[in-house]
Amino acid sequence: MSPPAAKFTLDITKFSSSQLQEFRRTKVAMVFQQFGLMDNRNVLENTYYGLELRGIPLKERTAKAQEMLAMVGLEGLENKKISSLSGGMKQRVGIARALTNDPDILLMDEAFSALDPLVKNDLQFELLRIQEKMNKTIIFITHDINEAFRLGNHIAILRDGRMIQNTDPETMFTHQADTYVQNFINNVNSSRALTVRNVMSTPNYLVRLRDGAAIALRNMRNSGLSSAYVVDEHLHFVGIITLDNALKVLNNELPYEQAILTNIPIISDTNASVEEIMPLSAQTPFPLPVVDNNKTFCGIITKASVLSSFVLNKG
């Protein structure tokens, strides 16, 4: 086992003015609540402004800015005036401007609070998509607890300048540090906080691929169910066999291999939120099978477990 990595702490309060200026220019970028764009500059010029301050040549900073504008969905709008943009588009410019600097840390100060709900929802998803590609450290300040649970993999709650609790969403949702935190998250949408791992269950039985239709039928009858989950010898999920299809196999109306329904939606990310898998659960007639990265069968997600996430006791 390799030794644990050394922790590194950087105290910027001890920086000189020149050190702090360099740190702010190269290591940190900001996305503001009220956009903070310059009306006398077009979209492209706003986006590469940080690189311009650092003395980056025009050709290089233009190319980088165009790349980031394309990432946030503003390709082709480089020459547009800021005044001609909607609020959502302005914030996309703000995000592109911050990313153009290629910072280690992205600070977002209530960046979506000035937007209407539909635009806000779109930009939240856009930020998750960008984060998946760029893997930046993002510190997102918000008073919207649902937004925090949707975006954050770590959530910190402050009170009077003091950190009350700092943990992952699941732990905060199920084990609040005190009544202040409990009251603060009282209105959180639990379907966003809970993950597949929290709500999946183990089926009453599994049918091995080698077992055949007779064993599957016996297990279904003994359990009072009308379908069974089929796995191979390595517990990899194969599919589902129904009661009707098992009877057809025994009556020589259908080969066993064809009786197994293999075109079944599966969930392969146990860290996905319940909210994410909700539409799939609603559309699928069977409980959704859950597999790990090796395609090993882990459990199932029932409609009941999805619905129960809405009424989970938050205390």
Image (cartoon, rainbow, N blue to C red):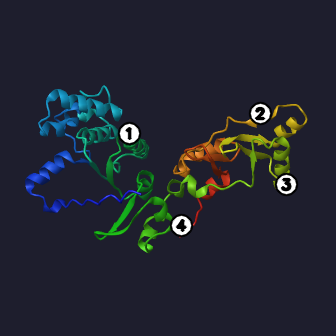
Residue in the foreground of this view, choosing between 22 and 230: 230
Q: CA distance from mark 2 to mark 3?
A: 23 Å
Amino acid found under the numbered disc labelled 2: Glu
- Residue identifier under label 2: 257
Tell me which numbered mark, 3 or 4, is placed earlier along the sequence.
3
Amino acid found under the numbered disc labelled 3: Asn
Q: CA distance from mark 3 to mark 4?
A: 36 Å
Furthest-bottom residue in view?
179
- Residue identifier under label 4: 314
Tell me which numbered mark, 1 or 2, is placed earlier along the sequence.
1
- Residue identifier under label 1: 133
Query: Image quadrant of residue 167?
Result: bottom left
| Identity of the residue drawn at 67% across and 34% down | 263
Q: Nearer the viewer, mark 1 or mark 2?
A: 2
Q: Secondary structure at mark 4?
A: loop
Could you classify mark 3 by the number of other residues whose Cα lies within 10 Å: few (under 14), some (14-19), or many (20 or more)?
few
Query: Image quadrant of residue 11?
Result: bottom left
Is 110 left, or right, of 261 in this rendering? Answer: left
Where does the N terminus fall, quadrant-wise?
bottom left
Q: CA distance from mark 1 to mark 4?
A: 33 Å
Q: Residue 217 at what x, y percent from top left? A: 84, 46
Tell me which numbered mark, 1 or 4, is placed earlier along the sequence.
1
| Identity of the residue drawn at 29% across and 31% down | 67
